Amino acid sequence: MKPKIQVAKTLDELSVAAADRITDIAKDAIEKRDTFSVSLAGGSTPKSLYSLLASEKYRTLLDWSKGTFFFGDERNVPPDSLESNYRMAHETLLGPLKIDPHRIHRWRTDFQDIEKTVSEYETRLREFFDGSTPGFDLMLLGLGTDAHTASLFPHTAALQETEKFAVANWVEKLNDHRFTITFPVINNAANLIFLVSGGDKADAVASVIEGPLRPDKPAQKVNSENGNLYWFLDEEAAAQLKAR
Ligand code: 6PG
């Protein structure tokens, strides 16, 4: 299905547009199945979106207690680290919404045992999705300047993973592992939302959406086989797009 691209002037406007779409998706899932599942993005771009979703206006739009929250990726740091995607999302979204901790599935980096962290998360995904390939109602994704998404970085082993749902991915340029879900999970989501802001991402955005297929542009492998793919961009991030 062709990606749906929405360009907003600023990150704040972008966050409003994404928040409107997200709440519609969640409300639709609740209407159909009385629940919704989300894979959250990390990094800094989603912070304003998460704070907005936890604000009075959006908090009252749906019953957030029916949501279950996973993380598309995590850094190899403790959950209370300033680098932690879990910490960022808990401070901006999950805490303010008072989400039941049993409905929050973070990568257990506190194990300080990479293989244990990965196998526990894989098990958690398989249990929640009854052993099938996880099919999130909504998956939020960011984009790096190198066209990585989640922690699927160029030239890393996880790009080739077709069986496992969760892996530890060695990222040479970071000299560290990153925990990430894999493309089988990403591409099985009902709704995929990229949230991208800033001129430093413009080249990556254009190369992923319009450029020739290249193995060093991981986000090109995101496709909405089973659902909708949305790009929420600010003007700067969309600057090199030919078609909008
Ligand atoms: C992470 C993210 C990563 C992020 C992009 C964009 O752990 O950093 O999951 O994929 O979405 O790197 O990050 P920014 O939003 O900080 O630019």
Image: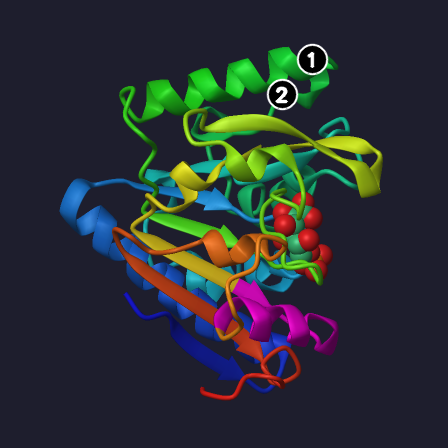
Does residue 203 belong to the magenta stretch? yes
Whole-percent x and y of residue 100? 46, 31
Residue type, label 2: Arg
Which of 148 and 107 lies nearest the eye of the viewer?
Answer: 148
Q: Which mark is residue 111?
A: 1
Q: Which mark is residue 108?
A: 2
Identify the magenta region: 195-209
Q: Secondary structure at mark 1?
A: helix
Left or right of residue 156: residue 232: left
Which of 64 and 210 lies nearest the eye of the viewer?
Answer: 210
Q: Does mark 2's beta carbon lie closer than 8 Å to ligand 1?
A: no
- Which of the 4 image quarters holds residue 74? top right
Name the main secondary structure of what is drawn in magenta: helix
Q: Secondary structure at mark 2?
A: loop
Q: Residue at x 63, y 77 (%)?
A: 237
Give the class, few, some or many, for how many residues have Cα within 10 Å of label 1's Cα (few <14, many ≥20). few
Whole-percent x and y of residue 47? 64, 58
**Vertical placement of 62 versus 76: above or below?**
below
- Which of the 4 image quarters holds residue 34? top left
Q: Residue at x 27, y 21 (%)?
A: 130
Residue type, label 1: Phe
Give the class, few, some or many, for how many residues have Cα within 10 Å of label 2's Cα (few <14, many ≥20). many
